[in-house]
Amino acid sequence: MKKIFAILGILALAAAGFVAFKMFQPLPDDLDLATTRATAAGHFMVSISPEDAAYQRNTIHTWIVEIATPDGALVEDAEILIDGGMPQHGHGLPTNPLMTEFLGEGRYKIEGVRFNMRGWWELKLTITAGEISDSITFNLVMK
Amino acid sequence: MKKALALGVVIGLAVSGAIAGYFYLQNKGLNEAELEIARTLSLASLRPLPADLSNAVADDPAAIALGEALFSEGGLSANGEISCATCHIEDRQFQDDLALSNGIGTTDRRAMPLRGAGYALWLFWDGRKDSLWSQALGPMESSVEHGFTRSQVAAYIAEHYRRPYEALFGALPALENTPAASPLGSAAQQAAWAAMSAEQQDQINRVFANTGKAIAAFERTLLPLENRFDRYVAALLAGQVPSGSAALTQQEIDGFKIFAGKGACVNCHNGPRFTDEFFHNTGIASPQTPVVDFGRLDAVAQVEADEFNCLGRYSDAAPARCGTLRFMSRDEHLFERAYKSPSLRGVADRPPYMHAGQLATLALVVEHYNRAMPSISGHTELEPLGLTTAEKAALLAFLKTL
């Protein structure tokens, strides 16, 4: 009897798994969607948030980036270069976003971001503060 | 034990069958992910027309009325007969069913349908204009379209549309005895332009720009129309079984699945206007050899240098609001022979296809995507799809629902 339940369980899981596979097929399942992360070499902690949380595909919009050191000190004099694109399609961003303003308290404004397709996007920030340069790639999913 | 195993398999199949059946019934042939894509493509997700801050009269009823009159005004052309409506015919989705259009001469690209153009970030196949009003100035001074000059446009407005113009934009400058003059015209017209004072030039430019703004106000009222696919999706979203004029055949539904899946069409033809507002090289043949039309590659510098762009003195927008232009991509590798993804609404009814009407039928378009030939210049973004004959037929059937 136990075996039957085991088999049933496995089959049900397989069915559910199949449906889930069909639904989420295009996205890798280990995608880190965190919007607060440490840069590659650990020099900075970076948070990103859209200025308007309701931003949509194909509208040009603004992101706010907050930069701190690992021990929590806000970074005031950073330069940020923005890059990105769709790894699964092999193309970049359809615009040329720029860091346009330092807003104070470790916060910076990035204008001119647009995502023109559905799916997985990378937003790559290269941050330079003083002698230190480090980068971080955030993952976003556009509906 | 064997019995138990068999029972397990039967129950297991029943369970998975029930789950699959649940999803089928729930979505009437589309799975959850497909229904979500269908929603984003349907009119249900068309957002309100975005404001055009570069055009202060963009939504002014008086400007719309003036623009509507000017849209079919033959007097704004060299022979008194060519108007916007010559190539953008209302009954024909505001295009002309030709590969190349006929004005004073013959254009080198295909006329584009205008419904929904008010949503576009970039205008023309190569996006060399960043607003509808600035776009409208192009054909008036094109030697193969209206064949007119900006000074003649201003003089014609002063003579025939003074009242509505002045009500909207204030007093017209003195324009009597203005010669045909434009910085873009024939040698004589350019010389006449150069002979004018900077103030005269500015006055004429302003009347010219305002004329474009009125025409643009009218064009903004031309919105996308509901099609069979929209009705199908609306019914599904309302939890109904699509029937009557909302029903799609199984072949059309299969075609949608290819559009959204294996065909990857939805990458570039996305959103309710079926466009990603961007430029792609899709390996379409060039009508001329050697190639003279490099698409977006040349347009980047043109829109940047355009005195009628969003950042220019005739724009009503504060520079901070000109994001489309300020953050424009300059990816030269990508832009050689890249053209704007066109909307696919109403597409079956308006052959020929592509930027110079290179493909005569929709079936040839599907074949083009299936093969994905290399580009004559630049690099195609397409890859061969390997669609079967049945899949191609289904995709074609789906395109006809739009």
Image (cartoon, helix red, strand yellow):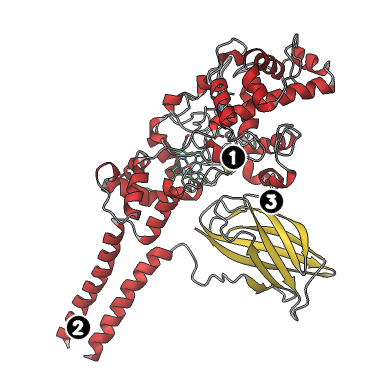
- Do callouts 3 and 2 mark residues in contact (Cβ within 8 Å)? no
**Residue B177 point in image, percent of width and height:** 75, 8
- Left or right, A59 with reference to A96: left
Q: Which residue is drawn at 43% across and 45% down?
A: B43
Q: Quadrant of the N terminus of chain B?
A: bottom left
Q: In this view, does B369 lie above or below A121?
A: above
Mark 3 vs mark 2, foreground winner is 3
Q: In this view, does B55 lie above or below B194?
A: below
Query: Toward the viewer: B114 or A12?
Result: B114
Query: Toward the viewer: A27 or B168?
Result: B168
Q: In this view, does B100 lie above or below A117?
A: above
Q: Pointer 1: what residue?
A: B338
The quadrant where residue B186 appears: top right
Q: Which of the labelled discs sits on residue A96, or is there none? A: 3
Tag 1: amino acid: Ala
Tag 3: amino acid: Asn
**Mark nearer the N terminus (1 vs 2):** 2
Label 1, label 2: how far apart the Cα atoms are: 59 Å
